[in-house]
Amino acid sequence: MESLAGLAVPPHEKWEIVVVDNNSTDATRQVVEGFTGDSPLEIRYLFEATQGLSHARNAGIKEAKGEILAFTDDDVRVDSQWLVELSACFKRFDCAGAGGQDYR
């Protein structure tokens, strides 16, 4: 969440964070709500009871308002230029999707 808060946002772009809690047993909801209170970002919490990556992502897709969807995971720290580069990719190549290397 901290690395998402530090993202550079391309000019004239709006973005949101949709956190999908995929039936976790930890304090995910409390962490998200605590971060939401301290952040100017648009952050929404969503609970998805059916476990599994596809269920979580599909729930997030349904909830998202944006035109471009970018997925990350709870153990990933994104680079501050992630949104800038992603937006540039879509503009340059007029593509329907983009992917990158998993550095974990």
Image: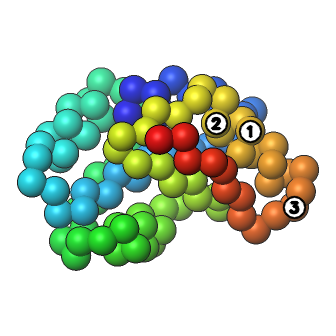
> Is the residue marked by circle 2 packed among few (<14), some (14-19), or many (20+) residues within 10 Å?
some
Read off the residue under disc 3: 94
- Measure how far apart labels 1 and 2 are at the Cα level: 5 Å
The N terminus appears in which quarter of the rendering? top left
Answer with left or right where residue 79 lies relative to residue 35.
Answer: right
- Measure how far apart labels 1 and 3 are at the Cα level: 14 Å
Answer with left or right where residue 61 lies relative to residue 88.
Answer: left
Read off the residue under disc 1: 85
Spot occupied by residue 11 in the image (x, y as percentages of width and height): 75, 33
Residue in the foreground of this view, choosing between 19 and 26: 26
Q: Is residue 47 visible?
A: yes
> Is the residue marked by circle 1 packed among few (<14), some (14-19), or many (20+) residues within 10 Å?
some
Reply above or below: 98 against 89. Answer: below
Disc number for residue 77: none
Q: How is the image coloured?
A: rainbow
Amino acid type indicated by mark 1: Glu
- Measure how far apart labels 3 and 2 are at the Cα level: 18 Å
Q: Are marks 1 and 2 in contact (CB under 8 Å)?
A: yes
Amino acid type indicated by mark 2: Trp
